[in-house]
Image: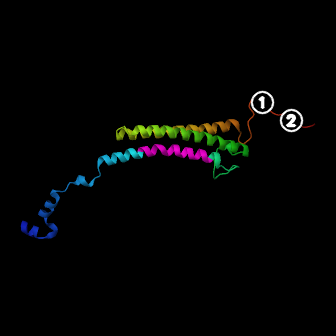
Amino acid sequence: MSTDPTVLNADPALDVASIKEMMDGFDPASLLPELDSLLELAVRLSRFAIFIGPVILLGMGLAYLFLSPKEANYHFGYRCYYGMGSVESWQFTQRLAGIVLGALGLVLTVIALIVSIGLSAREPMDAAWRAVYCLIFQAVLALLANAAIWGVTAYLFDAHGLPRRRGKPAPRNNRRK
């Protein structure tokens, strides 16, 4: 085996001098996308992300108001324990869920629009964190809305779907002896 540099350069696969020449003008950073375009993409994704929740809530609210079935089922509709006992409790629960979730979706859409406008004036990292805070705020409000719907339904109806009598005496037994 020879260590002569002329023999080493004779093999075209191992031509180190030509590889060095070719790599002299090469900048590896040119393969990466521009940082500004990546940061702009992050701000756009942040703007898009804050609109997903409110649009879903608005769509669900409208679906519960206008498309819910007339009787309780396990496939479509807002299902909760106290709302599935009777037709009356089912229809009340659907109307309540439609109004609450639709209104919350509408309000959160307006808030998301205001936040989205404000994101363009911020640094990309700050805009991303603002979007995360906005998403957390939306999730907490959606959970509170669901808890309120369940609570109101449980307050007004019992497990069998019968209306609870608040402050009224129980009906007397009119059986004859």
Is residue 155 among what the camera can see?
yes
Q: Which residue is mark 1?
A: 168
Measuring 11% from the left and 63% from the top, which residue is drawn there?
17
Q: Which portion, as a residue range, is magenta?
A: 46-63
- Foreground pick, 128 / 143: 128
Q: In what element is the residue under mark 2?
A: loop
Dot in front, 2 or 1: 1
- The reply, left or right, for residue 122 in relation to residue 152 is left
- The reply, left or right, for residue 126 in relation to residue 143 is left
Residue 20 location (% of width, % of height) = 14, 60
Three-letter code, disc 2: Asn
Measuring 46% from the left and 43% from the top, which residue is drawn there?
50
Find out whether residue 60 is within the magenta segment: yes
- The reply, left or right, for residue 139 in relation to residue 98 is left
Q: Residue 97, relative to residue 29: is it above or below?
A: above
Label 1 neighbour load within 10 Å: few <14, some 14-19, many 20+: few
Residue 139 location (% of width, % of height) = 51, 40
Q: Main secondary structure of the magenta part?
A: helix
Placement of the N terminus among the 4 image quadrants: bottom left
Measuring 57% from the left and 47% from the top, which residue is drawn there?
59
Residue 35 location (% of width, % of height) = 30, 47
Q: Residue furthest right?
A: 177
| N-term mark: 2 or 1 | 1
Q: Which residue is mark 2?
A: 173
Label annotation for residue 153: none
- Foreground pick, 1 / 167: 167
Residue 81 occupies quadrant: top right
Mark 2 to mark 1 CA distance (whole Å): 15 Å
Q: In what element is the residue under mark 1?
A: loop
Is residue 139 among what the camera can see?
no
Three-letter code, disc 1: Lys
- The reply, left or right, for residue 59 in relation to residue 40 is right
